[in-house]
Image (cartoon, rainbow, N blue to C red):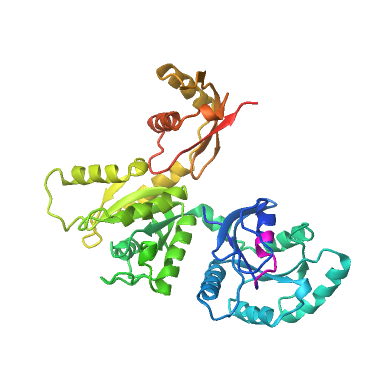
Amino acid sequence: MVLPVVAIVGQPNVGKSTLFNRIINQRLAIVEDKPGVTRDRNYAQAEWLGHKFDLIDTGGITWENSNIEEEIRAQAEIAIEEADVIIFLTNVANHVTNLDERIAQMLYQTKKPVILAVNKADNPEQRMDIYDFYSLGFGEPIPVSSVHGTGIGDLLDQIVQSLPKDLEQNDKEQISFSVIGRPNVGKSSIVNRLVGENRVIVNNEEGTTRDAVDTPFETDGTKFRIVDTAGIRRRGKVYEKTEKYSVMRAMGAIEHSDVVCLVLDASTGIREQDKHVAGYAHDAGRGIIIVVNKWDLPKKTSNSGKDFEQIIRAEFQYLDYAPILFVSAKTGQNLAKIPELVRRVSHNQQQRIKSSVLNDLLLETSKLVPTPMIKGKRLRVYYMTQVSTNPPTFVVFVNDPELMHFSYQRFLINQLRENFDFSGTPIKIIARKRK
């Protein structure tokens, strides 16, 4: 599900990570009272008064001439680019600094809503000092204390008011999917064929696509948003900065997709990097379709498709749920099947099963296979219920969660797949002790 994005930016050591943890109500970002602790971006989902949004924590922005500082600033710039709303966090104890003013100049150019928050305003005297920050030009500053929670509600109210009003409605009307894979497997050619225009640059040189490009289109009454992403290389092979940050954007595209199309190259076969790319999408819990491109190139026999599919299943054992489609962006073979397959996988991602049906299934499975016994103690399964979608997630209440062996979890997942259509989507099983 595509959610609005809110980024927290500011100079080092103003409390960005503490504010991030406060808003998401958990200790996810590392917090330490010295600058430079946060280097990469942290993502998490937050909610206020029924409004959900993705929150990004960034490293402190400086213009010092060092490789680390340049990387941190580049990460922050990517977060600013992704964001729909920006929280510009300052520190009341520092007053307005030259660095604050330089960051403000950068944020003016974004043309995006910027909320100015002044942190560490823990008492009335400190809150009186916030008026200096009007000079930054972002309207009325909001005094907050990330540590004590003062003013966080007012800040969240302002965030919700600033979120795009039409994004939630648009999200309900369209399915978002990204096209991922290592460089030069034909991702951009597939995108161009699907949308019927030269939307992205196509070139045989690896790494032509630098940025993630959003393209809306409609097929058979269903609205889609397709994202072509830069080819993902191994970390050791990412040499130039533009390519490195396009990899980061590709990861963001996966996070904000309902379904991911993993593109393989039939002419070169499966490589180790294909598995790494697939792992990103699987770990994110996204629906996955394996698209084998350039199927027009290899010499084939009557069993070529089955043989290649067996290789895929052997190499991607953890993606046994993902449908496989053989296509050719050059000839157009089977490309028309991609939108319908994306729609089907997206539907399966959002599928909900009634608890009564699940427990009937649980009763039947207990007759087929006895629950495991570990160190003389048998697992007892009492109840199963679905707690979320995207991906479908089920909680199983048992006598002792430590007795829920991975093999029995796998058995339950297989039973769910045999009885319901969950093709293309991972399934999560969570064991909980019955109280």
Residue nearer the viewer, 231 or 303: 231
Measured as percent of width and height from the top left, residue 121 is found at 80, 66
Q: How many labels does the image show?
A: 0
Q: In which quarter of the image is residue 136?
A: bottom right
Q: Is 401 drawn above or below residue 90 in the view shown?
A: above
* Side of 344 relative to 100 (left or right): left
Q: Is 203 drawn above or below residue 17 in the view shown?
A: below
* Side of 399 relative to 133 (left or right): left
Residue nearer the viewer, 129 or 38: 38
Measured as percent of width and height from the top left, residue 11 is found at 65, 73
Q: In which quarter of the image is residue 9?
A: bottom right
Q: Is 365 drawn above or below residue 409 in the view shown?
A: above
The question of residue 389 being in magenta is answered with: no
Q: Residue at x 71, y 72 (%)?
A: 90
Confirm whether residue 220 shows in the render. no
Measured as percent of width and height from the top left, residue 123 is found at 86, 64
Q: Which residue is drawn at 52% across and 76% down?
A: 70
- Locate the C terminus by quadrant: top right
Confirm whether residue 194 shows in the render. yes
Q: Is 311 drawn above or below residue 6 in the view shown?
A: above
* Side of 280 relative to 208 (left or right): right
Measured as percent of width and height from the top left, residue 40 is found at 54, 64
Which segment is the magenta one? 12-18
Residue nearer the viewer, 270 or 68: 68
